[in-house]
Structures are given as structure tokens and as C-alpha cells.
Image (cartoon, rainbow, N blue to C red):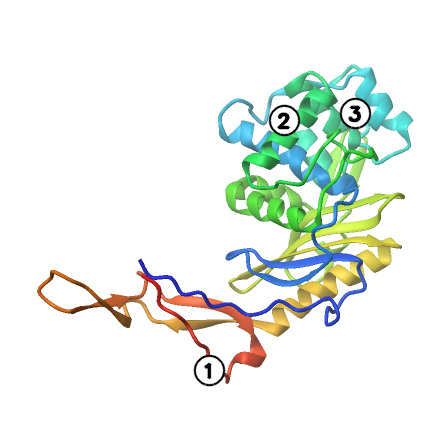
């Protein structure tokens, strides 16, 4: 086995090109962190936590436990807590009527409907509290040790908390695990009954490759966003939280993504099959055997400034 422990240092908080109190920029393919600022502090994630609501639903769809045309009832509780009477972001499903799972998913990804999230939670688990336990359990299963959930909406609760790092990891998981469902995040609009909803993600209209994911706001934590963009063959994930306005949320997220695409490039360390060293062996026909690279090229994401610098790798076997 060949291990090459080589990496570039992520930008420090003092160099970070963002005013966001909590921020992270991640390479979606490798998980490499390009920038981080107070990324491990637990904060109220607001509607960004609906990514976990959807992840639970997507998992059930993939397992064949749910179908997109399954119907979910809009209970009086869901209607009052997250629907028209709530004064929060809503899909406006009439009380005691049914909507399909696909409609509810679009109601979340486009309109951030709290009523849609509660309807899915009640339909899958019987109650918000029971579904929140599923959310926390799924977080642990996919490797998010800190996140705790109390509801499917992100409406404020002191025990409903995530870090921007875990939001980025969750976004990356959804992108890789549920590519078909990920397309819902990029929908520009969603007509439903007499309504026509337009996606609340303001970055979708910018020419920087953004195709998801979620915005969020509660007064206790300010404005935040999880966004992913793809340019050529590279995809980045940016998360910001704690900003004072929707305008700054948009600007800071866009700035992070543009900085990441501009400042980092993929460099090839070794070509496919290239011999990178030799290993000493005993009891064989030869004293040394060649160590070769992987089936494909061995690449690493590094700051463009390192392009002309010598990189040192270490062979461990």
C-alpha cells in the first residue's frame, strides 16, 4: 500500500476573503478544505438544516420505501406551525389536503416550505420529534458527530444546532449519494395550485455555476447559506453563517466560491502507472519491487501560487 501524505494548508481566518463569522469552503470531490473560519462552532442552522430533512427522505426513496407519487397529509399542526397561519416560509398546502412527496420536496428546495417539511416528517415518522430523532441518527451514520435536531424545519430551538463544517459535509454527501435528487435544488421555479414559487437561492441566477443548495435565517443566528457550484470539472461547496443581511449572505457566498475557483487548481503528481519509488522486500527473487501510482493519474488540489514550487511527498509502506 502506498500513502502520499501531501496537502496544502487551508487559508487561515486572518487571510479569509469573507466577513462571515462562520465559513468553510470545500472541494466536493476530495473533501479538501480550502478555507475555514470558526467552522466547528455549533450555531442554529435555520432552514439549512432542511438538507437533513431531505437526506432522510432521499434515503427512503433510494431504498424503495417511498415513491415520489406517495401522498402526504397536511395536518392541522403542520398547517398552523409551518403553513399559511405561521407567517413563515410556506408552500401553502391547504389544511387536511394531500400533496405528493415530489411536490413537497420541490416545496422545500424552491420555497423552503416549513409546512412541506413537517408534512414529510409526520408522514414518515408520525411526529416532528420522532422524525428529528431520525435526522440525528442519520447525521451520526454519515459521520456528523455534533449536529443535533429538534424539528424538520430549522425553526429556532436551543437544541437544534449544526456547524458549518457539518453542513458542508452533509451537502457533499447529498451531491454524491443522491445525484438524481440533487437536481431539485437547482429548479428555478415551482408552480403549485394558484402559486408560482421562485427559488430563494439568489446565486442560481449568477454566472458562477451554482446549482444548489439552501438558504437559512433565524434571528438568533442571522443569515446563512449552503451553496455548491461547478466550473468545468471542479465542484466547490461553500457555507456561511452569522451574517447580518440577505444581501451580505449572497455577496459573501459568491465571493468565497469565486475565490476558490480562482485561487486553486488541480495538479498532477504522478501519471497513471508511473513508478514513484521502490520498496525493500525480504525472501523474494529481488531486493526491491517498484511502487506504482493508481490506475488513473494521482492529482491534488493546491493553491495556484505553489505551481512553481517543489512539492515533497513521502512513501509509507
Give the alpha-carbon distance from disc 2 to disc 1, as whole Å: 48 Å
Residue depicted at 33% across the width and 71% down the height: 271
Residue tagged by mark 1?
310
Residue found at the very far left of the displayed protein: 285
* 86 versus 315 height, above or below: above
Residue found at the very far front of the displayed protein: 282
- Image spot of residue 126 (x, y percent): 69, 16
Specify the label residue 134 is tagged with.
Answer: 2
Residue tagged by mark 3?
93
Residue depicted at 65% across the width and 36% down the height: 52
Residue depicted at 65% across the width and 32% down the height: 136
Q: Nearer the viewer, residue 114 or 10?
A: 10
Mark 3 residue crowding within 10 angstroms, few (<14) / some (14–19) / many (20+): many
- Image spot of residue 112 (x, y percent): 76, 38
Q: Marks 1 and 3: which is nearer the front? A: 1
Q: Earlier in the sequence, mark 1 or mark 3?
A: 3
Amino acid at each position: 500500500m502506498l500513502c502520499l501524505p501531501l496537502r496544502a494548508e487551508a487559508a487561515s481566518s486572518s487571510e479569509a476573503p469573507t466577513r462571515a463569522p462562520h465559513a468553510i469552503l470545500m472541494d466536493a470531490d476530495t473533501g479538501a478544505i480550502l478555507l475555514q473560519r470558526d467552522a466547528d462552532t455549533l450555531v442554529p442552522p435555520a432552514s439549512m438544516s432542511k438538507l437533513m430533512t431531505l437526506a432522510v427522505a432521499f434515503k427512503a426513496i433510494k431504498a424503495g420505501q417511498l415513491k415520489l407519487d406517495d401522498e402526504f397529509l397536511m395536518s392541522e399542526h403542520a398547517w398552523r406551525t409551518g403553513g399559511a397561519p405561521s407567517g413563515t416560509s410556506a408552500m401553502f398546502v391547504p389544511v387536511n389536503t394531500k400533496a405528493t412527496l415530489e411536490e413537497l420536496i420541490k416545496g422545500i428546495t424552491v420555497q423552503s416550505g416549513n409546512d412541506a417539511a413537517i408534512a414529510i416528517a409526520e408522514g414518515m415518522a408520525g411526529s416532528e420529534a420522532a422524525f428529528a430523532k431520525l435526522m440525528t441518527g442519520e447525521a451520526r451514520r454519515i459521520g456528523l458527530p455534533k449536529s443535533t435536531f429538534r424539528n424538520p424545519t430549522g425553526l429556532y430551538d436551543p437544541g437544534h444546532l449544526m456547524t458549518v463544517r457539518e453542513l458542508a459535509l452533509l451537502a457533499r454527501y447529498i451531491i454524491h449519494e443522491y445525484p438524481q435528487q440533487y437536481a431539485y435544488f437547482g429548479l428555478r421555479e415551482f408552480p403549485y395550485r394558484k402559486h408560482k414559487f421562485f427559488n430563494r437561492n439568489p446565486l442560481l441566477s449568477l454566472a458562477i455555476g451554482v446549482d444548489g443548495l439552501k438558504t437559512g435565517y433565524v434571528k438568533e443566528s442571522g443569515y446563512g447559506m449552503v451553496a455548491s457550484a461547478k466550473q468545468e470539472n471542479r465542484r466547490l461547496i461553500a457555507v456561511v453563517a452569522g451574517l447580518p443581511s440577505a444581501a451580505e449572505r449572497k455577496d459573501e457566498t459568491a465571493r468565497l466560491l469565486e475565490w476558490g475557483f480562482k485561487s486553486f487548481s488541480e495538479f498532477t503528481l504522478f501519471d497513471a502507472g508511473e513508478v514513484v519509488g521502490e520498496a525493500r522486500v525480504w525472501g523474494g527473487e529481488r531486493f526491491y519491487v517498484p511502487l506504482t501510482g493508481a490506475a488513473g493519474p494521482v492529482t491534488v488540489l493546491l493553491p495556484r501560487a505553489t505551481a512553481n514550487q517543489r512539492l515533497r511527498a513521502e512513501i509509507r509502506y
